[in-house]
Image (cartoon, rainbow, N blue to C red):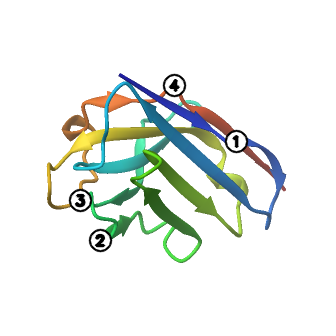
Amino acid sequence: VQLQASGGGLVQAGGSLRLSCAASGRTFSNYAMGWFRQAPGKEREFVATIEWSGRRTGYADSVKGRFTISRDNAKNTLYLQMNSLKPEDTAVYYCAGGARYLGGISSTPYEYGTWGQGTQVTVSS
């Protein structure tokens, strides 16, 4: 069971990036998935979450209106579209799966049973 995050990189403030998270070994189509991030010297924090069906989403206040989470269950892939990036968005971004079977969203890390390896996002000013 593996989640593979990709799409990170270096971008100027105001730019955009799209992160992807591909699942292998099992399907997460019946579970909520999420994105979290961790900046140097800080704790891991919630970014966005999406219900198994994709109909319901949730965002941290710091990214609301700039980031969009989505999923393609047929491809077993999770996405995070990040627009209007700011230097404070710089962090390692992690995808997570396995929360809230067939219902709900979650911003709580311990509810997720599987984590990806992380992808670095650096936003320059």
> In the displayed structure, does residue 111 sit left or right of residue 53?
left
Q: CA distance from mark 1 to mark 4?
A: 12 Å
Q: Residue at x 42, y 52 (%)?
A: 74
Name the residue type under label 4.
Gln
Looking at the picture, tell me which residue is in the foreground, 96 or 109: 96
Splitting the image into 4 quarters, where does residue 48 fall? bottom left
* SS at badge 2: loop
Residue at image location 19% in from the left, 40% down from the top:
111
Helix, strand or loop at label 1? It is loop
How far apart marks 4 and 2 lie (CA) works out to 25 Å
First-in-chain label (1 vs 3): 1
* Tag in front: 1 or 2: 2
Which quadrant holds the C terminus? Answer: bottom right
| Residue at 82% across, 51% down | 11
CB-based contact (under 8 Å), mark 3 and mark 2: yes
Q: Which mark is residue 8?
A: 1
The amino acid pointed to by label 2 is Arg
* Crowd tier of the residue under label 2, counting other residues whose Cα lies within 10 Å: few below 14, some 14–19, many 20 or above: some
Residue at 55 percent of width and 56 percent of height = 80
Circle 3 is placed at which residue position? 105
Q: Position of residue 91 (x, y in %)?
A: 61, 40
- Gap between marks 3 and 2 measured at Cα: 7 Å
Whole-angstrom CA distance, mark 1 to mark 2, is 25 Å
Q: Nearer the viewer, residue 18 or 111?
A: 18
Tell me residue 49's x, y (percent). 35, 57
The type of residue carrying mark 3 is Ile
Q: Nearer the viewer, residue 54 or 26?
A: 26
Q: Residue furthest bottom?
A: 65
Judging by the rendered image, the residue that carries numbered circle 4 is 117
Q: Residue 33 location in percent, x, y?
A: 34, 49
How many marks on residues?
A: 4
The residue that disc 2 covers is 56
